[in-house]
Amino acid sequence: MFGGCHIGLLVESRAAGLFVHTCAAAVCEDDEVMDGAEPTVQLHCADRSQVGLVLAVLDEAAAWLYAAGVQQWPLRFKPEWVRSDIEQGRTWLAWANGEPVATITLGWSDPLWEPADESGGYVHRLAVRRDAAGLGVFLLQWASTRVRRRNRQFLRLDCVAANDRLRSYYEQIGFLHCGEVEVAGAPGQRGGAARTVVSRYQRALNPLTWRVA
């Protein structure tokens, strides 16, 4: 599992689109429609056949970060890093005009936080393609809605502690810093000989209001 650089959030200032939430896995919730401006974006669970599509979005984000000199994710992701979350129905793809434009993973536990804590939902691997900038905030709002449906109070995520730009962004949209944790692995990777310090953030979801930078 990866925490992470949510590349779509680095430069965004708005949520956009009419979003149709569809489910491609049995563990997903009912369909829903969220009103907004055009264009239409469909959001559905990724299935096993779509591992490559998820990786394509993540790799584009990773390449952009690498070019920008940001050490947040590996240059390329491996299928085994994402396959378990996809099989468990935790990874989603956002589609526009028949193309995948973003991905987000939302889980219900995270070893960086108290193992027995059931008060939050945990966002990982949120990435938005550069030609779809504007979806990141919406995806966090969407994740918040799903977390609240489970009667949980916090949306939680993490990023590399040295990524001041991303940390500042989270704080601007209402996330509170909850301390640093050292994890095994290089930036973006969990497991391995290297060690990386990540910053944890959480956002209270009651009331459900958002400050957009």
Image (spheres, helix red, strand yellow):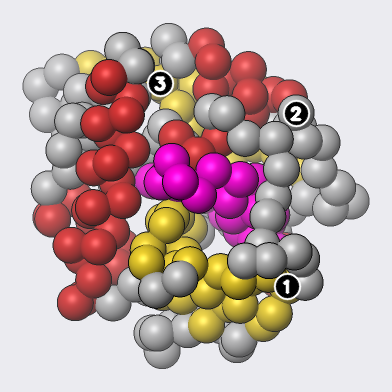
For mark 3, does the 10 Å Cα neighbourhood hold few (<14), some (14 to 19), or many (20 or more) residues?
many
| Quarter occupied by residue 198 | top left
Label 2: state its secondary structure. Answer: loop
Foreground tag (1 vs 3): 1
Q: Nearer the viewer, mark 2 or mark 3?
A: 2
- Residue type highlighted by circle 3: Val
Q: Earlier in the sequence, mark 1 or mark 2?
A: 1
Residue 2 placement (x, y as % from top left):
32, 41
How many angstroms separate mark 2 from mark 3 (CA)?
A: 21 Å
Which amino acid, by three-letter code, is at mark 1? Met
State whether residue 130 appears in this view. Answer: yes
- Camera-side residue of 38 and 160: 38
* Amino acid at dot 2: Ala
Mark 1 lies on residue: 34
Which label belongs to residue 213?
A: 2
191 shown above or below 181: below
Q: Answer few, some or many: residues within 10 Å of disc 1's Cα (few below 14, many 20 plus, some between 14 and 19).
A: few
Magenta span includes 145: yes
Residue 94 location, x and y as percent? 47, 65
CA neighbours of label 2 inside 10 A, class few (<14), some (14 to 19), many (20+)? few
**What residue is at 31 percent from the left and 51 percent from the top?**
57
Residue 202, x across and y down, in percent: 65, 36
The segment highlighted magenta reads 121-147
Q: Secondary structure at mark 1?
A: strand
Q: Secondary structure at mark 3?
A: strand
Mark 1–mark 2 distance (CA, rounded to whole Å):
22 Å
Labels 2 and 3: the sequence-earlier one: 3
Q: Quadrant of residue 89?
A: bottom left
Q: Which mark is residue 162?
A: none
Label 3: which residue?
A: 160
Q: Is residue 128 above or below residue 68?
A: below
What residue is drawn where x is 81% and y is 43%? 210
